[in-house]
Amino acid sequence: MVESRRGLLLINTGSGKGKTTAALGTAMRAAGNGMKVLVLQFLKGSWHYGELDAAEFFGGNLVIRQMGRGFVKVGGAETDPEDVRMVEHAWEEAHAAIDSGEWDMVILDEINYAIGYKMLDPVKVADALRNRPEMVHVILTGRNAHPLLVEMADTVTEMKEVKHAYQKGILAQKGIEF
Ligand code: ATP
Ligand code: MG
């Protein structure tokens, strides 16, 4: 029996460029179908990305919120408790949004980094995703996706770096990186 319509769990991971932009492309596709999409960006906050303004064109069908403050120091005593608190708050918002019935798609951008940096418990995330309302699509992005989440996901894409402009010393460009 093939299910014709259901909420999927997708993960965009790997070390190549395109994890966030692929998620935003899916968001645009969904919003164009009249679906309501919420993007919560873990850790991000200091840069102003073009997508924040582009979302305004979708009139409430696409909402993007930055839940961090940008650059994070990580590793044992280096990890600032304020960053951990912001990740916890982002996760509370994410969990509530997924269960609210208000959104058809919830994108948790860079959440894999928050988990990888041990700022968020993958078991807690997996439990919440497993018990989410049936029709909600969820996309997780960031390198080094946790194996527990990869295991339960429906579609997992690993971006592979062939080359990146940064290696030639080219810094982030408007419209490409932000
Ligand atoms: P994008 O937001 O462009 O889709 P991403 O989500 O795949 O990138 P992140 O790990 O979130 O990548 O990193 C975001 C930033 O780091 C972007 O500015 C991106 O261009 C840059 N970046 C991504 N991959 C690489 C790489 N392999 N080498 C250098 N910089 C990279
Ligand atoms: Mg990204």
Image (cartoon, rainbow, N blue to C red):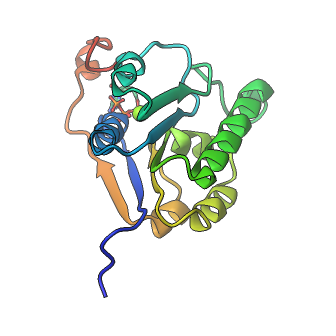
Using the image, determine if residue 12 lies above or below residue 88: below
Image quarter where the C terminus lies is top left
**Quadrant in which residue 22 is drawn:** top left
Q: Position of residue 170 (x, y in %)?
A: 26, 12
Using the image, determine if residue 62 lies above or below residue 165: below
**Quadrant in which residue 122 is drawn:** bottom right
Q: Position of residue 10 (x, y in %)?
A: 40, 56
Determine the residue positioned at 32% across, 51% down. 158
User: In this image, 42 relative to 52: left or right?
Assistant: right
Q: Is residue 47 visible?
A: yes
Determine the residue positioned at 23% across, 21% down. 165
Residue found at the very far left of the displayed protein: 162
Q: Quadrant of ligand 1?
A: top left
Q: Is residue 119 visible?
A: no
User: In this image, 7 relative to 166: left or right?
Assistant: right
Q: Position of residue 2 (x, y in %)?
A: 29, 82
User: In this image, 33 relative to 150: left or right?
Assistant: left
